[in-house]
Amino acid sequence: MGTQNGKITFIPQQGIVADNKKGVTAFFKFGEDVREQLVFPYTVERHRIRHENNEGKYYSLYMFFDESLRVWTAKGLTKISGFCCYKSFIFKGYELIGMDLERFLQLNLFHLDYIDEDYYSVAPGINFRHYKVYYNLAFQLSIYIWRKKIRVVLVCGFFFEKKMYEDPDYLEIFKLKKIED
């Protein structure tokens, strides 16, 4: 499938490689300065995550390939801390975006640790969808399923950053279930 301009390949514990199929490649590494990899056209937005006490943490969101690859930053708004992929996400040679859930489960690429059966969230180009979200702790992946296909892959989101999987109250409130072997 891929983005209309290229593909995104995940390198576990390192980052992602974005390739536009025109000879331009960027390696977005966790903890590195995003500005060193700005070889593709992009837009940037500044966002604020609100906490319970109404204070917030700011971060910048860099968007590439018509917003189908999103890179968010922390620490001075330039250090890469996570990714969101909507049109391409290659893992161990397999393109996950658009893959049937059943096929993905048959491949057994990694263990799925938690599931959110009904996650209501915005979708690209659409208002909102009800997703089923699977979480993998080893690679810090959130895999969003809609209509039995993988639609979005998030790397290193809030769930992992704050270790929400260790908070039984959070799991209960948001109805996340641990997947047993």
Image: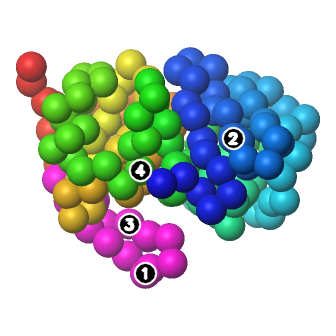
Q: Which residues are magenta?
A: 115-131
Q: Regarding mark 4 in the picture, which secondary structure is present there?
A: loop
Position in image of residue 135 (x %, y %): 31, 36
| Residues at discs 2 and 3 in contact (Cβ within 8 Å) | no
Amino acid type at circle 2 is: Ala
Q: Is 129 colored magenta in this rendering?
A: yes
Q: Which residue is mark 4?
A: 97
Q: Regarding mark 3 in the picture, which secondary structure is present there?
A: strand
Does any portion of residue 29 appear in the rendered image? Answer: yes
Amino acid type at circle 3 is: Ser
Q: As drawn, is 3 to the left or to the right of 60? A: left
Which of the two labelled residues, at mark 2 and mark 3, occupies the earlier sequence position? Answer: 2
Q: Which residue is mark 1?
A: 127
Q: Regarding mark 1 in the picture, which secondary structure is present there?
A: strand
- The structure residue drawn at horizontal position 9% and vertical position 19%, both measured from the top left corner, is 181
Does any portion of residue 60 appear in the rendered image? Answer: no
Residue nearest the viewer, comparing 95 with 167: 95
